[in-house]
Amino acid sequence: MNHRPHFLLLLAAVLTLVACREDEPAEADIGHAYFPVNIGHWVEYHVDSIRQHSDNNTAPDTVVYSFDIREELVEQLTDNEGRPVQRILRTTRDGNGNWIPKDVWWQAREQVRGERTEENMRRVKLYFPPRTGTRWNTNARNTDDAFEIGYTSVDQPYSVNGLNFENTVTVEGTYPPNPFITRNYRERWAKGVGLIEHEVDSINDQHSLGYNRFYVRYTITAYGDQ
């Protein structure tokens, strides 16, 4: 019996199947790697903070803080909207260099946005896919006044504290023009790492009635996975 025709037909079918698969478009990268959700992922930051306050045009009292923060994804749960969410355990170093619990935050990554609950305030941190010029209201999920932020750079290399990141996005926002309030916001996120820098400078200057300023900057110092 001649099996050659059957073999040729089988070979043609296999080649056709392979060709079809090669022609199928690859799954699009929409930037989810900028917002990791894997349990055990952690990032450590050095934090510098300034608080200033004065009344009636007096010189402001100034308090400066510097400390370290570690954020780790420690558990995945389902929230009351049926979404998978991750619990973020935040710890800080004590005087002996040991990490001690500080508080718990939450995060959720949906198809089109990454959201974090910080100090019980839900904020939309990233929008997918990242594109320069895309803007959104970070307070869309809470009761605060709208504050628009957006991408000013996408997929750019960046280095800080001896750490090199091949792909980062920068998110920035500025409070609308106001004679009393100034607020500048900037965050940088890296693929496979998450948030690597956070900076907010918020000033409420009521002139003769008082002056308040809050400044905080987080800068990554280490990261990894358990």
Image: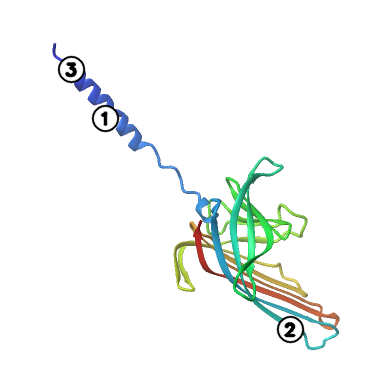
Q: Position of residue 22 (x, y in %)?
A: 33, 37
Question: Which residue is outermost to the left?
Answer: 2
Residue tagged by mark 3?
A: 5
Residue in the foreground of this view, choosing between 136 and 199: 199
Q: Which mark is residue 15?
A: 1
Q: Residue at coordinates 67% horizontally, 60% vertically from top-left?
A: 148
For the residue carrying disc 3, how many other residues have a C-alpha within 10 Å: few (<14), some (14-19), or many (20+)?
few
Disc 2 versus disc 3: distance between alpha carbons? 88 Å
Mark 1 vs mark 2: which is more N-terminal? 1
Q: Quadrant of residue 82?
A: top right
Residue tagged by mark 2?
A: 62
Mark 3 vs mark 1: which is more N-terminal? 3
Disc 1 versus disc 2: distance between alpha carbons? 73 Å
Determine the secondary structure under disc 3.
helix
Is label 3 in contact with label 1 (beta carbons under 8 Å)? Answer: no
Instruction: Please state which amino acid type lies under the numbered disc 2.
Output: Thr
Q: Position of residue 113 (x, y in %)?
A: 60, 50
Q: Quadrant of the N terminus?
A: top left
Determine the secondary structure under disc 1.
helix
Residue 156 in sight here: yes
Give the mark toward the camera: 1 or 2. 2
Give the mark toward the camera: 2 or 3. 2
Disc 3 versus disc 1: distance between alpha carbons? 15 Å
Mark 2 vs mark 3: which is more N-terminal? 3
Q: Residue at coordinates 63% horizontally, 74% vertically from top-left?
A: 67
Instruction: Please state which amino acid type lies under the numbered disc 3.
Output: Pro
